[in-house]
Image (tube, rainbow, N blue to C red):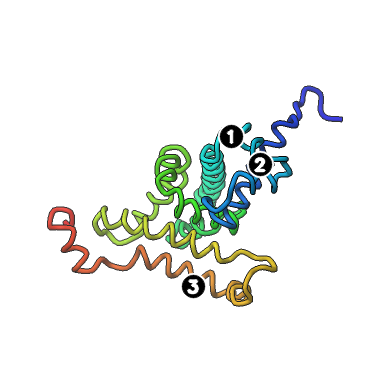
Amino acid sequence: MGIAGESRPGKGEIARERIKGEARRLFAQYGIDTVTIRDIAKAAGQRNGGSVNYYFRCKEDLVLEVLNDAARELDTIRGRQLDALEESNNPITLRAIMTILVLVDGFESDEQMRLFTMLQIYRRDSMHSEIPGKWDQAYQRCVAYLRGLIPDYPEKLFKQRLYFLIPYIWTFMATREGGSGQAKFWQEFWADPSTLENFLDTAEAMLLYPPSAAALSALGPQQAS
């Protein structure tokens, strides 16, 4: 028996969440455009694709809901990690912020990183329209810390490097997925404790490396100053 007054999810809500969970898994594993409504329905134990359309109207609505759910979850957990770092009174270092961006405790990081990689490839425009201003508060807090921890070079180059950095993190961390289907090379590669630390080194270097004369020249004198 449940607690008095406690509402239990109905069959429709359970089916809806199962569909969404399977869509999330399949999108991460196979790519968004490769996966069909029928694939999702079958994985979720539904009789046909009509049930998916019943709950989500169309595949694109389902994709957007998966995107928003994942982005909200990521932002919430990163926010908690930042709160804990600030409350610890420990020095807030570049390494600490990069670790929050790369490793999200409590987040199904391997599958989620693959999901975000697929979204970046197949729904880049949706990511840039759905996430900013809604599910990026913790990320923007990280960015503010990063800006104060790196050399003072032009803002435009800093923003460009962030655009390079995030897909770099998502794409490479997606290769950390475990399981029997993973190539032996990647199993051995990620089993080495130096791999992750070296990866963080490269992510930091992307922000710390001084802009070249060629990059500054391409900006023009007004933006480079």
Q: Are marks 3 and 2 in contact (CB under 8 Å)?
A: no
Task: Nearest to the eye among marks 1 and 3: give it.
Answer: 1
Seen in the picture, residue 204 relative to 43 is either above or below; the reply is below
Q: Residue at x 37, y 49 (%)?
A: 144
Q: Residue at x 25, y 59 (%)?
A: 153
Q: Which residue is mark 3?
A: 198
The circle on residue 19 is 2
Residue type indicated by callout 1: Phe
Give the mark nearest the N terminus, 1 or 3: 1
Quadrant location of residue 187? bottom right
Give the mark nearest the N terminus, 2 or 1: 2
Of residue 110 and residue 58, the one placed in the foreground of this image is 58
Q: Are marks 2 and 1 in contact (CB under 8 Å)?
A: yes
Task: Nearest to the eye among marks 3 and 2: give it.
Answer: 2
Residue type indicated by callout 3: Asn
Give left or right: position of 197 versus 18: left
Number of residues whose C-alpha sits closer than 10 Å to that of mark 1, classed few (under 14), some (14–19) or many (20 or more): some
Quadrant location of residue 31? bottom right
Of residue 177 and residue 59, the one placed in the foreground of this image is 59
Quadrant assignment for the N terminus: top right
Give left or right: position of 143 versus 81: left
Of residue 52 and residue 195, the one placed in the foreground of this image is 52
Q: Which residue is mark 1?
A: 56
Q: Position of residue 104 (x, y in %)?
A: 56, 54
Q: Position of residue 119 (x, y in %)?
A: 48, 51
Furthest-right residue in this view = 1
Q: Secondary structure at mark 1?
A: helix
Residue type indicated by callout 2: Ile
Seen in the picture, residue 197 relative to 144 is either above or below; the reply is below
